[in-house]
Image (cartoon, coloured by chain):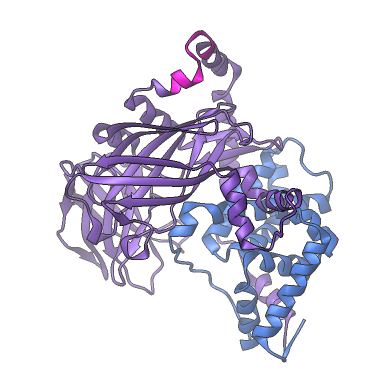
Chain colours: A purple, B blue
């Protein structure tokens, strides 16, 4: 006899393996430090500068490329207060090394005004295998009430005439990214779009890129999307179960934007170490360094729960790029970490089930 | 909030938060990250709930919201996570029923979890997930039907 009680029994055996308390307390302490960053002492001069200067628009769009990168780097993690009075940590999770990207990116200056939301493609970088585009935005649209994060959705990309979103051309066919505000209460934002290219579509020459963003959405719109749609149907006497009305709804509320530009791959800073390293059935097949990422191709025995941690020559840990972690080709895993200018990296394979994250195997590998 | 108060809250509700997150996102690592995030949000909340029941409901609601955030993220949609959750089944029926529930879409799974595991009523669930009681009842009814369809006549709910 099967019953729902079987579900309850299995659920009751689920256990936390991580010490979440420690992590939560660490975040509270971090939040407390960040709060000081947003004190009046810091914010007032910013507003004063805006009033004295040429306004927010001019402040943002007069930025040189280095400033944009610096802003983006600062915003990999900020905190902001939501409408409900809670403070949220906003993490872009991209873990890109903006200092490395800044040295190689090319300015774009493609601007688009979307019903009060001014979007600008600021700069682009391509290492042949990935395209990274930096955007800034200024929100003067009163419909977008969320003041700390805006999502860009329904993105269609065409690279060299090929539809990137098509499964055969893409590693990640569902693409979206989000803009994070500059500081609490600001109406200016930065967002980064990462486009990892499938091997057959790696770029070697200047290529046209077309990007269509179907709509921009605040977190509030996402959370209450169904309610907003139902409200719209009620107001317009439409059937909310009819999918055509969904399209109609988005065609009316969506604010689409189109960008067209060229990208020239810059592989001058790419370096690859293809020497094979192995120990205890762990094999490192390739380590590649570019301004976009440090990529490690490796395999580990299936029966072991190992994770890879990477450190530069000064012992700094390189973060895994959460938006583009890499791929598994059936035999080898490729993982992307934040870029480094280090000449040597240490790869530690650690047992994730051990209490102290014991290092099972370690490799020192030259990369530059 | 003092550290001792944080510890007290954490140890009292950690399993409830983690299991609600797991029922929504089906992934051990993500559920653990969400658990950390939920308690962090609670610890810095300016006006925390004033009693046990409200605290529990607040934590579950925040867990679900955090799961939604993860679901809409680029990371979740584009990266296939290697989930190493060690589920313990004592009978084949447990495995079959659990997997049938987990194969439902999140909006149905969470209703089943809150109704049958946490023992909430449809009105209480409606307050937690911010939907009308009628919506909750209709989702519960559809979820039951889907489970009956996939588990056959031997399944009783």
Q: Residue at x 68, y 78 (%)?
A: B146
Circle count:
0
Instruction: Pinpoint residue A130: horizontal percent, then vertical percent.
Output: 29, 49
Q: Residue at x 16, y 54 (%)?
A: A273
For the C terminus of chain A, the quadrant is: top left
What is the residue that sits farthest to the front in this orientation?
A237
Q: Does the image show residue A20?
A: no
Secondary structure character of the magenta stretch overall = helix
Q: Residue at x 67, y 61 (%)?
A: B20
- Magenta region includes residue A59: yes
Residue A18 left/right relative to B131: left
Relative depth, front residue between B23 and A252: A252
Instruction: Pinpoint residue A227: horizontal percent, then vertical percent.
Output: 71, 51
Residue A364 left/right relative to A38: left
For the N terminus of chain A, the quadrant is: bottom right
Instruction: Pinpoint residue A264: horizontal percent, then vertical percent.
Output: 21, 42
Residue A258 left/right relative to B151: left
Residue A30 appears in which quarter of the rendering? top right
Q: Is residue A2 above or below residue B103?
A: below
Instruction: Pinpoint residue A148: horizontal percent, then vertical percent.
Output: 57, 35
Q: Which residues are magenta?
A: A50-60
Q: Does the image show residue B27?
A: yes
- Magenta region includes residue A169: no
Relative depth, front residue between A163 and A281: A163
Relative depth, front residue between B12 and A123: A123
Residue B78 appears in which quarter of the rendering? bottom left
């Amino acid at each position: 006899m099967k019953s729902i009680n079987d579900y309850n029994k299995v659920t009751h055996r689920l256990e936390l393996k991580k010490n979440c308390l420690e992590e939560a307390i660490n975040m509270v302490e971090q939040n407390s430090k960040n709060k000081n960053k947003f004190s009046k002492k810091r914010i007032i001069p910013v507003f004063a500068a805006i009033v004295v200067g040429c306004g927010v628009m001019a402040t943002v769009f007069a930025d040189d490329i280095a400033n944009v990168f610096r802003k983006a780097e600062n915003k990999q993690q900020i905190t902001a207060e939501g409408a409900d009075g809670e403070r949220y940590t906003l993490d872009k999770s991209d873990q890109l090394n903006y200092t490395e990207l800044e040295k190689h990116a090319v300015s774009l200056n493609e601007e688009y005004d979307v019903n009060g939301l001014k979007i600008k493609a600021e700069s682009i970088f391509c290492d042949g295998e990935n395209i990274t585009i930096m955007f800034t935005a200024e929100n003067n649209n009163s419909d977008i009430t969320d003041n700390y994060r805006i999502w860009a959705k329904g993105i269609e990309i065409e690279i060299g005439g090929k539809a990137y979103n098509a499964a055969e051309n893409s590693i990640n066919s569902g693409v979206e990214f989000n803009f994070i505000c500059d500081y609490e209460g600001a109406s200016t934002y930065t967002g980064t779009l990462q486009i990892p290219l499938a091997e057959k579509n790696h770029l070697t020459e200047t290529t046209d890129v077309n990007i269509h963003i179907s709509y921009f959405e605040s977190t509030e719109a996402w959370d209450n999307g169904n309610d907003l749609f139902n409200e719209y149907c009620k107001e317009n006497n439409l059937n909310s179960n009819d999918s055509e009305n969904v399209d109609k709804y988005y065609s009316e509320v969506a604010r689409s934007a189109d960008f067209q530009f060229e990208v020239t791959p810059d592989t001058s800073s790419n370096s690859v170490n293809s020497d094979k390293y192995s120990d205890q059935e762990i094999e490192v097949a390739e380590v590649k360094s570019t301004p976009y990422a440090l990529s490690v191709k490796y395999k580990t025995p299936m029966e072991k729960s190992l994770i890879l941690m990477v450190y530069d020559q000064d012992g700094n840990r390189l973060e895994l790029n959460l938006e583009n972690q890499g791929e598994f080709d059936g035999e080898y895993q490729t993982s992307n970490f934040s870029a480094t200018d280090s000449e040597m990296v240490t790869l530690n394979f650690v047992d994730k089930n051990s209490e102290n994250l014991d290092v099972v195997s370690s490799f020192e590998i030259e990369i530059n | 909030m003092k550290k001792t108060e944080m510890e007290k809250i954490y140890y009292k509700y950690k399993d409830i938060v983690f299991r609600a997150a797991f029922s929504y996102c089906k992934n051990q690592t993500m559920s653990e990250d969400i658990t950390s995030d939920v308690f962090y949000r609670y610890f810095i909340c300016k006006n925390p709930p004033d009693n046990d029941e409200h605290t529990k409901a607040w934590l579950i609601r925040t867990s679900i919201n955090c799961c939604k955030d993860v679901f809409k993220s680029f990371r979740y949609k584009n990266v296939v996570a290697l989930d190493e959750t060690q589920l313990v089944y004592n009978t084949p029926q447990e495995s079959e029923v659990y997997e049938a529930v987990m194969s439902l879409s999140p909006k149905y799974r969470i209703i089943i979890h809150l109704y049958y595991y946490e023992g909430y009523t449809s009105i209480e669930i409606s307050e937690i997930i911010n939907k009308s009681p009628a919506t909750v009842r209709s989702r519960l009814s559809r979820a039951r039907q889907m489970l009956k369809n996939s588990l056959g006549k031997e399944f009783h709910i």
